[in-house]
Image (cartoon, rainbow, N blue to C red):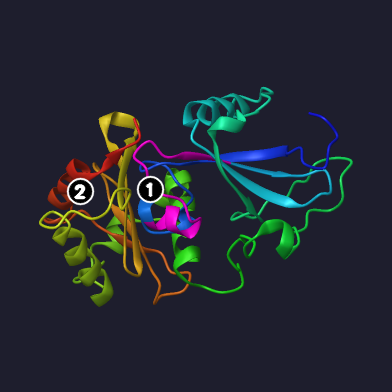
Amino acid sequence: MSGDDDALYVLTAVMLTPARFPGVLGDDYPAACAALDLRPVARGYGLILGQDGKGARWTVATRDTALVALAIATWDCGLPYDLSPSERDIVASLPGWPLALAVSAPGLAEPHDPSEEEGGRPPLVPPDTERWGPAQRRLGADEIALQWRTWRAQVDDAKDFAAPGAGRHPAVRRVLAEAKAYTDDPPPPGRIRSSFAEGGARALRADGPGWSIVARTDDIAFVLLDEEPGEVLPVGRGPELPSLLEALDKLAVRLD
């Protein structure tokens, strides 16, 4: 890229679609779009995070989701990719970053937010990791989904689910009832998401007011609650969970 102050030095990119969006932004796709003042169009957006020539943080939203998805897949393979969306596909340039990044563009000033005059709106900021709330709860659910095997290995089925009432925390019962209610009153797009899992199963993610569920259709579920800071509550299959997960999977936006 050129050395102009207006040039964007790309650091990373994420998808903002009904099936795939940063959990910190909201419980569903429309909520995530609203956090960025974007219209929740069906095809979604790609979000490009970078710095301008002065080092200021910017988040650029592009409608060219295919280009951003290709860049992310290429980077995941450890290969370089010059992500340069066309100007005609850019729908917004927002000051700040909604996600915390530990990297910066070489040769530029330390990452900082542009001035209020330059940005035209308050800058986007990542969630405060020192406090527990909806964003942190969703980040925790994201981590469990990414590291399912690690979290699953920590659960001893015989110990954690054998005792009477195991997994039936009062708030967990409420969460499962609210999730079941989705089968009668489908939630906004992205509130339930489904992706491929080994063994022909599906990996499920469901969110609601104050709660998140991470599950596999052939296994158990984990529940995180706003009211239980940092706690991860395992839910055994029992007689009800399999049918609930199957029903949620039918409602889910599918990643693949």
Residue 38 inside the magenta-drawn segment: yes
> Along the line of sight, which residue is nearer the eye, 124 or 7?
7
The image shows residue 214 at horizontal and vertical percentages of 35, 52
Q: Seen in the image, is 146 located left or right of residue 238?
A: right
Name the quadrant of the N terminus.
Answer: top right
Residue 18: image quadrant is top left
Magenta highlight range: 31-47
Q: Nearer the viewer, residue 49 or 236?
A: 49
Q: Tag on residue 72?
A: none
From the image, tell me which residue sits under label 2: 248
Q: State the SS at label 2.
A: helix
Which of the pair 66/150 is nearer the observer?
66
Name the residue rendered at 33%, 48% in the picture.
Answer: 190
Residue 179 forms part of the magenta stretch: no
74 w.r.t. 218: above or below: above
What residue would you read off at disc 1? 40
Q: Is residue 125 left or right of residue 167?
A: right
